Image (cartoon, rainbow, N blue to C red):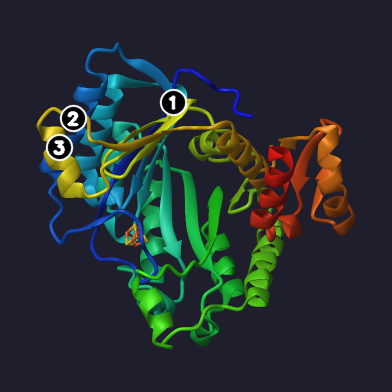
Amino acid sequence: MCNSRSAVPRHVYVHVPFCARRCSYCDFAIAVRREVPVSEYLQSLAKELQVRFGETPAKDVDTIYFGGGTPSRLGGDGLARAVALVTRYFTPAAGAEITIEANPEDVTATAAAQWRIAGVNRVSLGAQSFDNAVLDWMHRTHDGAATKSAVSTLQNADITNLSLDLIFALPESLHRNLENDIDQLLTLEPDHVSLYGLTIEPTTALGKWVQVGKAVEQPEEGYEMDFLTANRLLTSAGFEHYEVSNYAKPGKQAVHNAAYWANVPYVALGPAAHGFDGETRRWNLRNYAEWRDVVMTGTDPIEGSELLTNENRVAESVYLGLRSEAGLLTTNSDHAVIDRWIQAGWASVGADNRLRCTTNGWLRLDSLAAALTHHRSR
Ligand code: SF4
């Protein structure tokens, strides 16, 4: 059960939708632009802040996260101005985490220095793979060397809290060597790694390749093998597997993402951004131009909202609890479902009475969460 009703949000998400082109697997809310309309976007963001928070005093927050899309496409100055706009309304508390997502090709020495001066202290870099043929297939706009260069540029600019994203479970026909990719990643010594299994959405280029037989989804055994291989290599290198898709060196867990998993309130700004006030989820207009046009008339760019029902809350608390090492507080009644998981090695219950998935349990996360939600909802 969410314990955050009516709490004041201490986390802010800002969606920056621009990308140079669409990756073959991506169905995110993005705006493909060769030239990024930086000033137009910043004016619209300023307007949304004014419309939604103009009458309220500035609040202290623990995290600000610029996600996308590709926030680094705003450039050094553009992103620094975006941070300045947001921090007028949301003041970073001492030690606050300010993260930007970046693609390697946008990381120049000048941009990195401007981000650091603006207060950015963590960068999540979209590496995905170090194999250039794989990166081409993904329609990424960088090669493996660009990722390595971006890491050293960021470190030289004193942004040392770095996370790298990798994708696994690629079609077998690509002959991607995951072990080699993880070895290369480890030489860069990131603090944090996000590891996502490839999902095939029907509206993407990849979805269309699958429909016409140009690509074949990795079979389930391959997915499991990749997941376990990554777990073995990363935990041997000193990373803690603290959430189904995330690994961190001790003390380097992502504070902003942990807020989502803890189901606490957060503010969300920008097109398609989803926020939560402890009771209600709200989301902004998804299309960039619509969001911009509506907000520039001085109107809240909200597209919809949903007051969470008790059923929603049960489902969310189970899913969110099981996906991270924080775990889920168990009740006596849960044992009718979870005893079998414990025997199978998919979960354990600690002295704190919290249920935690094992690595093998995380491979079954969706079905375990569905079973326990069903049980708790009866
Ligand atoms: S860079 Fe990220 S958001 Fe942009 S198209 Fe690629 S996967 Fe999607």
Asked which secondary structure carries label 3, the reply is helix
Dot 2 or dot 3, earlier in sequence = 2
Checking the image for residue 44, the label placed there is none
Q: Amino acid at mark 1?
A: Asp
Dot 3 or dot 1, earlier in sequence = 1
- Tell me the quadrant of ligand 1: bottom left
Residue shown at 82% from the left, 30% from the top: 352
Q: Name the one closer to the observer, 140 or 7.
A: 7
In this picture, residue 178 sits left or right of residue 154? right
Q: Amino acid at mark 3?
A: Val
- On the image, the x and y values in percent for residue 206 come to 39, 75
- On the image, the x and y values in percent for residue 25 come to 39, 68
Q: Is residue 168 visible?
A: yes
- Residue assigned mark 2: 46
- Residue assigned mark 1: 277
Residue shown at 35% from the left, 71% from the top: 24
Residue shown at 62% from the left, 46% from the top: 249
Asked which secondary structure carries label 1, the reply is loop
Q: Amino acid at mark 2?
A: Ala
Dot 2 or dot 1, earlier in sequence = 2
- Residue assigned mark 3: 294
